[in-house]
Amino acid sequence: MEQNNALLERIRLFVLDLDGTIYLGDRLLPGAAKFITTAKEKGRQVLFFTNNTSRSPMEYVERLSRMGIPVTREDILTAGDVTIHYLQTHCAGQSVYLLGVPALRQSFAEAGISLTEEQPDLVVVGFDKTLTYERLEKACIYLRRGAHFLATHPDINCPTEAEPIPDCGAICQAITTSTGFMPHSLGKPAAETVELVEAASGLPREAIAFVGDRLYTDVACGTQNGACGILVMTGETTPEMLAESSFFPDAVFPSLGAMAPLL
């Protein structure tokens, strides 16, 4: 307990996952709102970061607000934001064939990313709930013709109230199995995510904690990049998965609500 107290004391910014951490489906998880309120009362910053690119940032603003957690666009970062920043920084002027929902396509277009349906420089895959076999086929063809392969995030499944559903990583695995090419994944746990959070917050990574329900994204984003990785047991990770994992959290809590009294 003392160790967890000391760890939480040095954190100035909590980067909170959404699916499986703040809510499941349309259900706010118990204690989540209390943690956010307590953290802000104690002078901590809170940023919401989701790898889920099936919704726009403004949709997350509206969703959290409906759940009684008022936020602005500046409080939200997504793997889509990290991907856009990466493309603007490292792939300026290059064309993109995007597997993504209309909201992600709109975000890319508004950011000046050149989207194309023919002979792209890059194939970018997101959490595409509108995916068709034809588009999957074209992505594979373009990769074989020399396009570079990016993924907005590596998550295999997205947690829901009912059952987990295939996420971006599952789509990428189908493409990799077909072509042999593996993507460079952005979002959590990529170093590019920590760099963007540092830049947005103005805080050093040693004062930042990534909090979420997944070992290989939320926890790894912190522990593998010089920040802190905190696991909450309200989503994907089971006790059995934790016991067998090669990713070791800095701390484990039953929920966000269990963290609030220790701040």
Image (tube, rainbow, N blue to C red):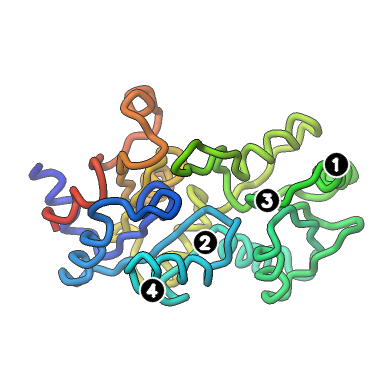
Q: What element carries label 4?
A: loop
Is disc 2 placed on a helix, strand or loop?
strand
Residue at image x 40%, y 63%?
48
Earlier in the chain: of badge 4 and badge 1, it is: 4
* Residue drawn at x 16%, y 46% as measured from the top left: 4
Q: Earlier in the sequence, mark 3 or mark 1?
A: 3
Task: Pick whichever of labels 3 and 2 is earlier in the sequence.
Answer: 2
Which residue is label 2 attached to?
78
Which of pointers 3 and 2 indicates the residue nearer the eye? 3
Please report whichever mark, 2 or 1, sits nearer to the chain's N-terminal start: 2
The type of residue carrying mark 1 is: Glu
The residue depicted at 36 percent of the width and 59 percent of the height is 15
Q: Name the residue under label 1.
A: 137
Would you say the residues marked 3 and 4 are in contact, meaning their CB atoms lie under 8 Å apart?
no
Q: Determine the CA span between mark 3 and mark 4.
A: 25 Å
Residue 213, located in which quarter of the rendered image? top left
* Side (left or right) of 188 relative to 23: right
Q: Name the residue under label 3.
A: 128
Compute the Cα span from label 3 to label 2: 15 Å
Other-residue count near label 2 (Cα within 10 Å), few / some / many at <14 / 14–19 / ≥20: many
